[in-house]
Image (cartoon, rainbow, N blue to C red):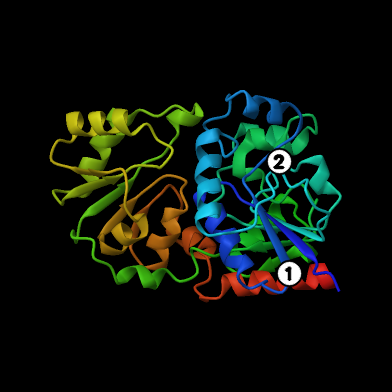
Amino acid sequence: MLMKKILFICGSMNQTTQMHQISEWLGDYDRYFTPFFSDGLLGVASGKGLLEFTILGRKRSGRALQYLLDNDLQLDTGGTGRDYDLVITCTDLIVPKEIRRKKIVLVQEGMTEPETVLYHLARNFRWVPRWVAGTAMTGLSDLYEKFCVASEGYRDLFIRKGVNPDKIVVTSIPNFDNCEQYLRNDFEYRDFVLVCTSDNRETFIYENRKKNIGKYLDMAGGHQLIFKLHPNENAVRAIREIRNWAPESLVFAEGKTEEMIANSRMLIAQFSSTIFVGSALNKTVHCGLPPEELRALTPLQNKSAARRIADVCRSVIDG
């Protein structure tokens, strides 16, 4: 009897490692992986190198592909090589036509972005593509069978936005379901204020970095300030700015952000999934969300998200 086939659509390293973890609980299926892809105009733009600031860009696709190769995972780039019984993905902002004919399980990747004017445009006008509004539109395609989410707080949030409650399953999400593991680390610094920067400028969103750095210095109140740069950020520019405006600070472009958060006294971030780690570890977190809302949204610390998501996938593929 032929094994049923599952396609895992990857993307950022967070998405890619989540897909890998889920796949390890589905070893009795034939599993294939692909970097993120699209058809239509976005596919053309990606091929011309015009989307380097997204997961469709060559840089991020290359990282995902290298990870898949390093871990000896079966590849089907673009997902057209086989007839799949199930597709698992971390985003429904873009759903290629070929995939829409398959059973899909959507997995929440992490933090969702705020509901801006673009969100309301995409929500109310079908001709505005979901991806224009970013992750604020997560779950609103309704093209999936089940949607695995991080917490009861997120379940309530997605229902308020209009997601079908019957499709939502609270499972927590891999990479954020066991944050206490990061307390055991060898990062040499302790009791500092950590700033996780954003890639706003790389995605054409205005940010006054000089003003923000001044604000961070005030918030640190004399404590050591450490900057951890966003992986998609222009590191050369960011390091130059920080050394100019906060010369006593330390800057890291590489390293395990979660371990830095575990050793910090305070975390400062914008709309980044790193705030979940800080919240789960009971750190003081400044992120623009009220503390009670952040606590409600924080992923369940059940240490079993990948297995629980795999169980959902089994119910879809075999049900």
Residue 282 % position (x, y): 36, 67
* Residue 110 appears in view: no
State the residue in front, 118 or 257: 257
* Residue 208 appears in view: yes
Look at mark 1 in the image and give the residue it sits on.
29
Residue found 23% across the figure and 65% down from its top:
186
Residue 156 % position (x, y): 65, 61
Residue found 25% across the figure and 60% down from its top:
265
Residue found 23% across the figure and 48% down from its top:
226
Amino acid carrying label 2: it is Ile
Answer with left or right where residue 18 lies relative to residue 9.
Answer: left
Front: mark 1 or 2: 1
Residue 304 % position (x, y): 56, 75
Q: Give neighbour class at mark 1: few <14, some 14-19, many 20+ (Cα, 10 Å).
A: some
Residue found 82% across the figure and 58% down from its top:
103
| Marking on residue 81 | none
Residue 95 % position (x, y): 75, 43
Q: Give neighbour class at mark 2: few <14, some 14-19, many 20+ (Cα, 10 Å).
A: some
Marks 1 and 2, how far apart at CA:
25 Å
State the residue in front, 51 or 127: 51
Q: Where, by quadrant of the figure, is residue 283 drawn?
A: bottom left
Look at mark 2 in the image and give the residue it sits on.
94
State the residue in front, 108 or 266: 108
Q: SS class of the residue under badge 1?
A: loop
Answer with left or right where residue 87 lies relative to residue 218.
Answer: right
Cβ–Cβ under 8 Å for marks 1 and 2: no
**Against 212, is 70 above or below?**
below
Amino acid carrying label 1: it is Tyr
Q: SS class of the residue under badge 2?
A: loop
- Which numbered disc flags the more N-terminal residue, 1 or 2? 1
